[in-house]
Amino acid sequence: MSTLRVDSIRGQTADGNYRYIVQMQSTTITDTTTITATSATATGHIVSITPKFSNSLILINLTGGEQSYSGGSSGDAMVGRLHLYRQLTGGSYTSLAQVQEQANGGVNYGNPHSVEFVDTTHATTSAINYQIYAQVNANTYYYNYTPSNLVLKATEIAQ
């Protein structure tokens, strides 16, 4: 076993600040969530992290799995949207941003999930829950259509 010890870390960024990864938390789902709602609906895909520093950046990534749409004819424009919601200290979930949108005509399968978002406004060292919400303008949206590993990850980056 090896041990790395340092007295200080100095950044090489243009502003002279150091940034380093403090911790990473992730949650993986393998089930499909079916969404038919036209308003943002909770998927149940949640990652929790308790920041060590209140001014840290929290990098949120959603990768893997597939999203797909069905129920329309080839001429129907279907729009699926993913939103990132945040819950601070056990309060209500509030929207941070729409983080992905897929627009397709008719049935479409196999689009990968690919989201990256940086939370700069949490200002806490208490537990934070991040959850993906989804919606569709018509017909049906499948979050993680072909059940596979869909990973939601929160990485704390100190600055």
Image (cartoon, rainbow, N blue to C red):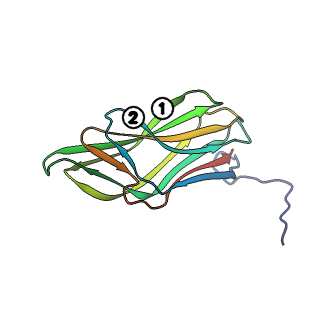
**Quick check: 122 left or right of 61?**
right
Residue 114, image x, y percentages = 43, 54
Say which element carries label 1: strand
Q: Which residue position is annotated with label 1?
A: 95
Say which element carries label 2: loop
Quick check: 157 above or below 66?
above
- In terms of image quadrants, where is residue 159? top right
Residue 82, image x, y percentages = 40, 42
Residue 122, image x, y percentages = 62, 33
Residue at the top extreme of this rendering: 91
Q: Which residue position is annotated with label 2?
A: 40
**Quick check: 70 left or right of 50?**
left
Q: Quadrant of the N terminus?
A: bottom right
Q: Residue at x 24, y 42 (%)?
A: 139
Residue at the bottom extreme of this rendering: 1
Question: Which one is earlier in the sequence, the residue at label 1 or at label 2?
Answer: 2
Quick check: 3 above or below 151?
below
- Amino acid, disc 1: Ser
Residue 19, image x, y percentages = 68, 50
Q: Residues within 10 Å of mark 2 (few under 14, many from 20)?
A: some
Quick check: 14 above or below 5?
above
Q: Residue at x 74, y 42 (%)?
A: 52
Separation of residues labelled 1 and 2 (CA atoms):
9 Å
